[in-house]
Image: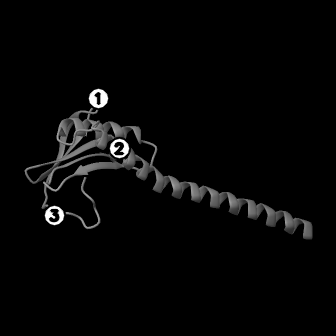
Amino acid sequence: MQKGEEVVSQVARELHDDLNLHIERRIYNFRAIPYLVNQIVLKEIKLGDIDLENKLSLEQYLIKLINLLEFTSIDTIQYGNEKGDYIGAGRLKDGSLVIKVTVNGDFYTYSTDESKERKQLLSIRQITIRGTVPGIKLL
């Protein structure tokens, strides 16, 4: 009887350890991947590989990047500045990609085609720019 309890206890410990390892990996990926992507993008901006003034180029860069990150925790990548410009790329729950931009205070969301270009206007929302967000450092 005692031997059986020891075996059950050992199996329980192994399951517990495996579960802890799995949870640690998920948390690491959830936190580390967005940080690494942010560092890569920041470096590309500083090197001049990304032109923040060329909105179409930036839009294409973001949509291609979000497409590459399909199997990560990242579902949106965005850029905004103090002038109220906003460009973003995101993945909807069904896996489809969207492009999000502001134009004259309106927030537009577009579906994308196979070549990751704007396909169809999905929605327009009016937004109010309230200034900078505390703790966010502008480039």
Question: Considering the numbered disc 3 on the image, is that residue within a helix, a strand or a loop?
Answer: loop
Q: Which residue is located at x 58 percent, y 59 percent?
A: 23
Q: CA distance from mark 2 to mark 3?
A: 25 Å
Q: Are marks 2 and 1 in contact (CB under 8 Å)?
A: no
Q: Is residue 82 left or right of residue 18?
A: left
Question: Is any atom of residue 34 visible in this view?
Answer: yes
Instruction: Give the residue number, with chain letter if any, for mark 3.
Output: 131
Judge depth for marks 1 and 3 and give the one in front: 3
Q: From what the image shows, is residue 84 above or below residue 121?
A: below
Q: Which x, y percent locates residue 116? A: 28, 33
The mark nearer the N terminus, 2 or 3, is: 2
Furthest-top residue in view?
115
- Judge by depth and name the residue closer to the eye, 108 or 43: 43
Instruction: Give the residue number, with chain letter if any, for mark 1.
Output: 115
Circle 3 packing at 10 Å, graded few (<14), some (14-19), many (20+), is few
Q: From what the image shows, is residue 11 above or below residue 44?
A: below
Q: CA distance from mark 2 to mark 1?
A: 26 Å
Q: Which residue is located at x 36 percent, y 45 percent?
A: 94
Judge depth for marks 2 and 3 and give the one in front: 2
Q: Which x, y percent locates residue 84? A: 14, 54
Q: Which mark is residue 43?
A: 2
Q: From what the image shows, is residue 135 above or below residue 72?
A: below
Q: Is residue 74 left or right of residue 101?
A: right
Judge depth for marks 2 and 1 and give the one in front: 2
